[in-house]
């Protein structure tokens, strides 16, 4: 039998339990806007019963643990999907940047991957102007004014090629910087994870329960790391998390066992490896992998296509131009200089002597326009080196492919964000703090605390009655 003093102990134990519930509900409410926080609950268990003449008698309840309400499966899924989302975001952003650097607008209304004819500053407009200039020269083959106009249009086109190539090269440099920044931030997060492992194991050694707030922060650091790289994590029996990237153990318990570093593969493009191994690391997903992929495939492919176009233009125009004669009877002058989009230029001799532009196929017939006509006809000539397309068709296809890649990236990212939003909502429904629910718990524990206090007050009155009987 408990007796009056046992009943007092039961009441005191109940007070402590309800007070613990109020404190945990208050902690939840304080963290309602903390994205890293998972709501906590007091685990209440029946206290040990005691023997009595009428059988085992209960001695109240006690708080045995404070537990986090989390789903490890959802946490793992969110980490994985975050890596995929970050890779797609990096690709989409780079493709949008590449499109803007082309100086072309993508058409709409059923022509989502074509060049918008309203664009006035891109290579497409430059090509059109150049061949229109050749055709105008054919109409006035003896006119130096027309030669000046052709020269200036050619210079403008060459500058567009060089500017676009440089813009894309700068984009590659920017993506290199993004890779380096991502590696630096990932290494910092690996340090944070190792440090939190140490704090968690220290806090939990010989102590009941788990270091819930530290574990929440550890989960947040893992999700931040997943933005940069895909990794595998396993939890040890002591609560520490081991992290493996591309099959390489990076964090083991309280120690960061390896680190990420960038290296130049030989062409100025940064790749990623670990400090302990010279081979490129398989990152799988994350913003670093996304930046490397779009840099080495999409941006590099775009530069290659533009260079092929510029090289074909230089070769074909020079081949036709070489067959002609200037208005002063000279011949043998190339129209374009350079070999591709990065160094294309117009013969500098044309600056002071536009008469050197060769429009005639006869040295003594300045009014002959056959070469100018042939140069103008290149606009519609299919080029074997461009897949049997004209210059304009080849460039339009390049722009179209970029537009299609961007459209695909937008769709993939939208789908991925929908998946991630769904997972986040599922986790919030489990782990998120509900103000209404916590206020309900707060009221429940408050009422229970008041009832426990009333129990103690009642037992105190009973003791006072018994003491009074002895007076």
Image (spheres, rainbow, N blue to C red):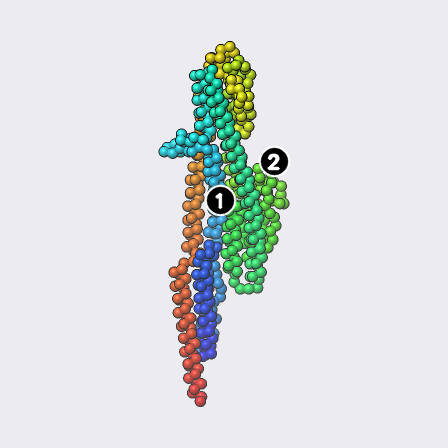
Specify the farthest residue to the bottom.
471
Residue drawn at (43%, 87%), measured in percent from left and top?
469
- The residue where tag 1 is placed is 86
Q: Secondary structure at mark 1?
A: helix
144 or 302: nearer the eye?
A: 144
Residue drawn at (51%, 48%), measured in percent from left and top?
226
Q: Report the disc number at residue 395.
A: none
Image: 386 above or below 449: above
247 or 446: nearer the eye?
A: 446
Where does the image place residue 376, in percent across and percent down from the top left? 45, 19
- Residue 260 figure quarter: top right
336 or 316: nearer the eye?
A: 336
Q: Is residue 332 visible?
A: yes
Q: Secondary structure at mark 2?
A: loop
Q: Report the disc number at residue 266.
A: 2
Residue drawn at (47%, 59%), measured in percent from left and top?
68
């Amino acid at each position: 039998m408990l007796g009056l003093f046992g009943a007092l102990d039961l009441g005191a134990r109940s007070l402590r339990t309800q007070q613990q519930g109020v404190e945990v509900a208050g902690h939840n409410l304080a963290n309602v806007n903390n994205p890293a926080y998972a709501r906590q609950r007091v685990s209440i268990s029946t206290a040990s019963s005691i023997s009595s003449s009428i059988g085992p008698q209960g001695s109240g309840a006690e708080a045995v643990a404070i537990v986090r309400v989390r789903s490890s499966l959802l946490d793992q899924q969110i980490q994985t999907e975050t890596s995929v989302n970050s890779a797609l975001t990096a690709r989409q952003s780079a493709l949008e940047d590449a499109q803007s650097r082309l100086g072309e607008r993508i058409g709409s209304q059923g022509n989502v991957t074509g060049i918008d004819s309203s664009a006035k500053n891109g290579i497409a407009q430059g090509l059109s102007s150049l061949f229109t200039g050749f055709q105008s020269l054919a109409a006035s083959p003896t006119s130096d004014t027309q030669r000046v106009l052709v020269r200036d249009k050619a210079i403008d086109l060459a500058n567009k090629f060089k500017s676009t190539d440089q813009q894309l090269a700068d984009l590659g440099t920017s993506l290199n910087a993004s890779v380096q920044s991502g590696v630096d931030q990932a290494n910092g997060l690996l340090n944070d994870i190792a440090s939190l492992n140490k704090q968690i194991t220290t806090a939990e050694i010989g102590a009941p329960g788990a270091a819930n707030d530290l574990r929440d922060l550890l989960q947040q650091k893992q999700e931040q790391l997943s933005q940069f790289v895909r990794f595998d994590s396993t939890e040890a029996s002591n609560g520490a998390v081991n992290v493996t990237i591309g099959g390489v153990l990076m964090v083991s318990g309280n120690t960061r066992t390896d680190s990420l570093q960038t290296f130049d593969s030989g062409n100025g493009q940064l790749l990623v490896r670990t400090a302990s191994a010279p081979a490129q690391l398989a990152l799988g997903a994350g913003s670093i992998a996304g930046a490397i992929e779009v840099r080495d495939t999409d941006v590099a492919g775009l530069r290659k296509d533009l260079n092929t176009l510029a090289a074909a233009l230089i070769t074909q125009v020079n081949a036709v131009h070489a067959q002609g004669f200037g208005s002063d009877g000279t011949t043998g002058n190339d129209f374009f200089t350079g070999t591709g989009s990065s160094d294309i230029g117009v013969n500098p001799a044309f600056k002071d002597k536009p008469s050197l532009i060769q429009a005639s196929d006869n040295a003594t017939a300045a009014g002959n326009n056959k070469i100018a006509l042939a140069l103008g006809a290149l606009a519609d000539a299919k080029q074997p080196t461009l897949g049997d397309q004209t210059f304009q068709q080849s460039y339009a296809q390049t722009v179209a492919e970029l537009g299609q890649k961007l459209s695909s990236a937008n769709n993939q990212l939208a789908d991925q964000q929908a998946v991630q939003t769904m997972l986040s909502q599922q986790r919030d429904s489990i782990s998120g703090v509900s103000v209404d629910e916590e206020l309900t718990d707060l009221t429940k524990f408050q009422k229970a605390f008041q009832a426990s206090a009333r129990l103690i007050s009642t037992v105190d009155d009973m003791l006072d009655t018994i003491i009074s009987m002895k007076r």
